[in-house]
Image (cartoon, helix red, strand yellow):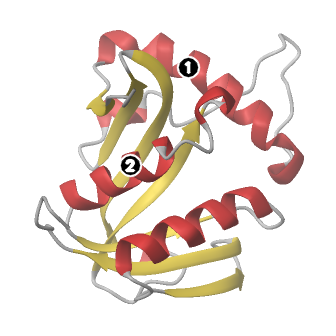
Amino acid sequence: MLSVIEVIPIPYEDKYVLHQLLQFYRYDSSEYDGHKLTQHGLYMYKYLDHQWTEDYRSPFFIKVDGELAGFALIIRDVPAEFVALSTASESHVVSDFFVMRKFRGQGVGKHAAFTLFDQFPGVWEVRQSLGNTPANKFWMKTIHAYTNGCFIEEVIHNDRWKGPVQVFESKTRDANS
């Protein structure tokens, strides 16, 4: 049976739902990025409100057959001075991307990424924390499939970022491609 995978904008009214999913995401990635629990047993995410107050941010839920499966936080049209590797005048950045373990390995993340790349044509920069090998493998495989191998990757060690970064250009694709 084929699953229906949706990537839908998160309305402000669902801010708390995103907050809850961010807890799973931060827990999953804490072994790579060092995030620590607060004294109240929560992971902080200082950009939560910014998802709806800054026009260049776009938060999305990923759903499978109507069930929450993850989220993607995108930053659109980032000026060159705020990216790690891209030399384009403006780039889109995958700020945070999470697929619940239950849905991993089923093409859900790939489908969601392709949907977002198609929705926002232009130059993209995708970053992974240093040492987060599972995320790096996912993005390398996904971006390679999307671009047919036309992307660059570099491991960055500077003030802006420490870890692998991929840069590529997306274009609106034919529905059959």
For image coordinates 10% across by 66% down, the residue present is 174
In the picture shown, does residue 103 fall above or below 163?
A: above
Left or right: residue 44 versus residue 172 is right
Q: Work out whether residue 71 or residue 104 is closer to the camera in this orientation and state it.
A: 104
- SS label for mark 1: helix
Residue 169 location, x and y as percent? 30, 79
Asked which quadrant contains residue 132, the reply is bottom right
Asked which quadrant contains residue 84, the reply is bottom right
Q: Earlier in the sequence, mark 1 or mark 2?
A: 1
Q: Work out whether residue 136 or residue 17 is closer to the camera in this orientation and state it.
A: 136
Question: If the image is split into quadrants, where does the N terminus sit?
Answer: top left
Left or right: residue 46 versus residue 147 is right
Asked which quadrant contains residue 11, the reply is top left
CA–CA distance between discs 1 and 2?
23 Å
Q: What's under tag 1, amino acid-wise?
A: His
For image coordinates 12% across by 58% down, the residue present is 175
| Residue that carries the numbered disc 1 in the rendered image | 19
Q: Work out whether residue 32 or residue 50 is closer to the camera in this orientation and state it.
A: 32
| Residue that carries the numbered disc 2 in the rendered image | 111
Residue 85 location, x and y as percent? 52, 84
Is residue 81 something that shows in the picture? yes
User: Which numbered marker is on residue 48?
Assistant: none
For image coordinates 48% across by 77% down, the residue present is 144
For image coordinates 62% across by 60% down, the residue present is 138
Left or right: residue 68 versus residue 40 is left
In the picture shown, does residue 114 fall above or below 59?
A: below
Q: What's under tag 2, amino acid-wise?
A: His
- SS label for mark 2: helix
Is residue 82 something that shows in the picture? no
Q: Residue furthest front?
A: 1
Judge depth for marks 1 and 2 and give the one in front. 2
